[in-house]
Structure formats: structure tokens, C-alpha cells
Image: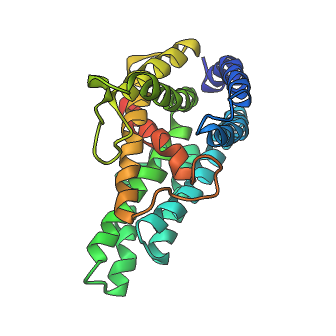
Amino acid sequence: MTAALATTELLARAVPVVGGALGLGGVAVATLPARIRLRAELRRRWRTWALAAPLFLGAFLAGEPGAFGLAAGLGVVAVAEYARLAGLGRGEWAVLTGAALLLPLLAWRAPERLGLQTAAPLLVAAALPALLGGDAERGFTRAGRTVFGLLWIPVALCGLVLLGPAALAVGVAVSFGDVGAWCGGTVLGRRGPLARPLSPLSPAKTWAGVVGAAAATGAVLLALGAWSPGLWAAALGGCVFGDLLESMVKREAGVKDAGSWLPGFGGLLDRIDSLLVALALALVGAA
């Protein structure tokens, strides 16, 4: 079976699953009583989901060009938010933006070029702004943060192109997993051992959320006919560690959200943090 045919078959399963979830979610948030504290935020989040889901699924419907466009578009916005969080200058932002466009393009048109022959120039490019500027005080920090940004965002997003239908399955599973983590934390995380936080970086993230994410990601992958131990582990790992990783970056930056333009979430990084880690782990599993 070709990758295009496999993606088409997976989309045929994903559309009713996602559409049904959005429909049920829409009814749920529309009927929430006024006394519910998070009612307004949940409604904003649902509207964002309702707009984002067709864009995500539609990108895969367009095949590899669509996957490239999705990866490049997400990358350009995400690296701009990251550069602001990390306190990077225009030089580092330009390097990250260039990589956000170049790496998905190579993943689409010349995947054999992705390797050490690409990693070496990127490593030099990450340090170049500080080297040319003679920054002896923060040069190493700037270069290190740029390298981290390259791995976290452009490299991970290459998975949208390289993984084919598995990228679609991981993306849908992570979306449901984030919701499952919230539901698990709300229902099971009030008391007992499951109420313990995973990390001081994000005290609201508990072991109950891990249980909820594990159940949701596994159930969705089964519904899509795409379950495998590797994909489930990648999706679950993204749900568990993606938010913690971004929380670490945001805490050092002293901000609550990566942005303020995405209703109900903050910035794009706040929405795709789990996806980035999940794609990176899935790429490792597929290697």
C-alpha cells in the first residue's frame, strides 16, 4: 500500500472521529451552566479546535505538499514565539526561520539530504550571530538556545512530512491525549497518589493526567486502526513531556504563555508543545 493510499484510508477514519468529538464537545460547552468557572475559556478552546482540526486534516488531504506547508507554517510561527521567549536576537531568529522553511522542504523533496551533512551547517549557523557579534558574555547561551530551538521545532516538524500517515495518527492522538490528560486530572487528580504532580515545573500536571492521556491516546489510535506500541509511546510521551518542556522555557522567561493571539491557549507553542515532542519521538522510533 502506498503512503498516499494509507493516508487517504486513515483520513476516512479520522474525519468522523474528530468530527464526532467536536460535535459532542460543542454541545457540552454550549450547555455548561454559567456558574462553571472555566466556561468561557472552554468555549474559546472549542472554537480554536473547530478551526484548527480542518486545517490539520486538510493539509494531509493535500498529500506531501500539504504536509510540507503545514510543517513550514507551524514552524515559522513557533520559532518566532520561541525566539522571543529565549531572548534571542534577529540573527538567531533568522537562522531558526530559515531552518523552519528549509528542513521541511528537504524532508519533502530530498529526505536523503537530512543527516550529518545538514546538521553540521546548522550547528555553525546557530553560533554564527554570536560569533560575528563577538558576544563574550552571552554568546554560548545564545548558541545553545538556538540549537535547542532547532531540534525542538524545525527538526521535530519534519516528522509531519517524513512519517506520512503515522504523522496524521500521532497528531490526532496527541490532540485527544491533551484533552484526556485534562479530564483525568480533573476526575482522578483531586486526592490520593494520582494527585501528585509530575514536576514542580507544572504543579497542575499530575499522574492522574498521565492516566487520562494514556487512555485517550490508546483509544484514538485503536479507533483509527493505527495502534502500535511505538506510536502510542510517542503520543503519550508528547502529552506528558511536551507541556513540561515548554513550562521550563516559559518559567525561565518569566511568562505564562508563549503568546496571546490563539483563543483559549495563548500562543501556538502552547498548542503544539505536545505534538513537537511526539513527532520527535516517533521519528526516533521510525529510524
Residue 148 visible in rendering: no
Up/down of 55 relative to 218, above or below: below
Instruction: Look at 48% across and 31% down and name the residue there.
Output: 182
By what rule are the colours in the image chosen? rainbow
Work out which residue is located at the far bottom of the displayed protein and give it. Answer: 134
Q: Position of residue 192 (x, y in %)?
A: 28, 23
On screen, residue 201 versus residue 6, left or right, reads left
Choose between 30 and 210: the one closer to the eye. 30
Q: Say which of 157 and 119 sits in front.
A: 157
Q: Which image quadrant: the C terminus? A: top left
Say if 86 sits above or below 110 in the image: below
- Give residue 160's quadrant in the image: top right
Front-most of residues 262 and 110: 262
Residue at the location (41% across, 42% down)? 242
The percent coordinates of residue 163 (x first, y second) are 51, 33
Q: Tell me if residue 82 can be seen.
A: yes
In the image, what residue occupies the spot 50% across and 56% down?
257
Give x and y (percent) for residue 227. Answer: 48, 16
Left or right, 34 with reference to 243: right
- Outermost residue on the front side: it is 35
Quick check: 234 above or below 218? below
